[in-house]
């Protein structure tokens, strides 16, 4: 057994040793267990995984804890953050001080994440060749870089997460989400539907509609999905700008 196989076997054991998440099943459950294992094994306060979306960005698939889930969702809501940059560049994005260099790069996200106690974020893409399935984000409540050993371990966790997703997709078959991820992936369609409604209601393009959704979500302290659902249900009506 080579070194890569040793790392995968170790991470698989750590993942399987974690208790299943309440109400989760299939691939979603395994990703949750992996996040919990990574949060325990790495010098981290929490770990989360997001899957690649399209124009609306990414959707959180799993998190080790509620705070990490909230910070992960911020990137989807605000449209900026290390996870999104890792998805775009297909390279790790390592931010050892959110209130320093992070605030320059992602001013709104960095401030919002800091309010939740996060001081450093390390995003590793879930890559397969030139394709990217998502990203694994490691959160810490103190500043400072990951050691080379810890970074290598984070990359190994990301590689195992990628393998889990590929196996789940293989089980599901073509044109179907991996088992247990139906609800996660359906959120992108709710956002798209809300965008479409706003283009008609407000007379704006899709990009402007998404900006309106994000601005309202940030102002009200809600997630982008929550605001989209309110638009779709008719409980929220955004106003057309005055001429």
Image: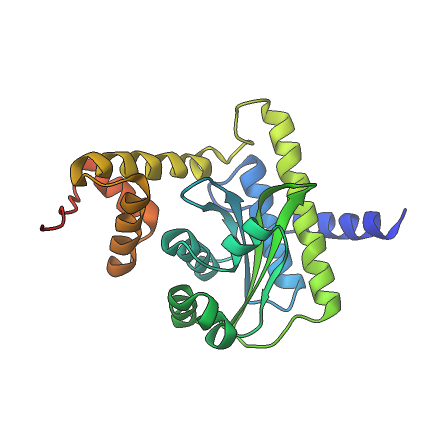
Q: Position of residue 62 (x, y in %)?
A: 51, 48
Which residue sits furthest front?
243
Which residue sits furthest right?
1
Q: Is residue 156 above or below residue 56?
A: below
Q: Is residue 88 above or below residue 204?
A: below
Which residue sits furthest top?
174
Left or right for 62, reference 149: left
- Give me the residue at 27% from left, 44% from top: 209
Does residue 203 appear anywhere in the picture?
yes
Q: Is residue 12 above or below residue 171?
A: below
- Give me the residue at 22% from left, 39% from top: 198
Left or right for 141, reference 76: right
- Give me the residue at 69% from left, 63% from top: 151
Q: Position of residue 90 (x, y in %)?
A: 62, 50
- Give me the residue at 52% from left, 44% from top: 51
Q: Is residue 51 above or below residue 118?
A: above
Name the quadrant containing residue 166: top right
Q: How many marks?
A: 0
Give the camera-side residue of 180 and 91. 91
Which residue sits furthest left?
243
Name the quadrant containing residue 178: top right
Q: Position of residue 153 (x, y in %)?
A: 72, 60
Left or right for 75, reference 170: left
């Amino acid at each position: 057994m080579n070194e890569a196989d040793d790392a995968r076997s170790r991470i698989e054991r750590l993942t399987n040793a974690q208790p299943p998440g309440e109400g989760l099943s299939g691939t979603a459950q395994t990703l949750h267990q992996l996040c919990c294992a990574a949060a325990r094994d790495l010098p981290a306060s929490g770990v989360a995984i997001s899957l690649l979306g399209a124009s609306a960005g990414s959707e959180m698939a799993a998190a080790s804890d509620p705070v990490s889930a909230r910070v992960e969702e911020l990137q989807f809501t605000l449209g900026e953050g290390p996870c999104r940059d890792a998805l775009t560049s297909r390279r790790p994005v390592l931010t050892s001080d959110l209130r320093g260099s992070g605030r320059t790069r992602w001013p709104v996200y960095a401030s919002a994440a800091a309010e939740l106690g996060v001081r450093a974020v390390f995003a590793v893409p879930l890559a397969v060749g030139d394709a990217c399935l998502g990203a694994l984000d490691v959160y810490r409540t103190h500043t400072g870089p990951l050691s080379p050993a810890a970074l290598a371990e984070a990359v190994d966790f990301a590689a195992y997460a990628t393998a889990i997703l590929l196996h789940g997709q293989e089980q599901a078959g073509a044109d179907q989400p991996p088992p247990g991820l139906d609800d996660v992936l359906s959120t992108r369609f709710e956002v798209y539907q809300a965008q479409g409604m706003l283009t008609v209601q407000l007379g704006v393009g899709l990009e402007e509609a998404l900006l309106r959704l994000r601005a309202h979500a940030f102002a009200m302290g809600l997630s982008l999905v929550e605001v989209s659902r309110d638009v779709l249900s008719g409980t929220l009506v955004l106003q057309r700008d005055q001429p």
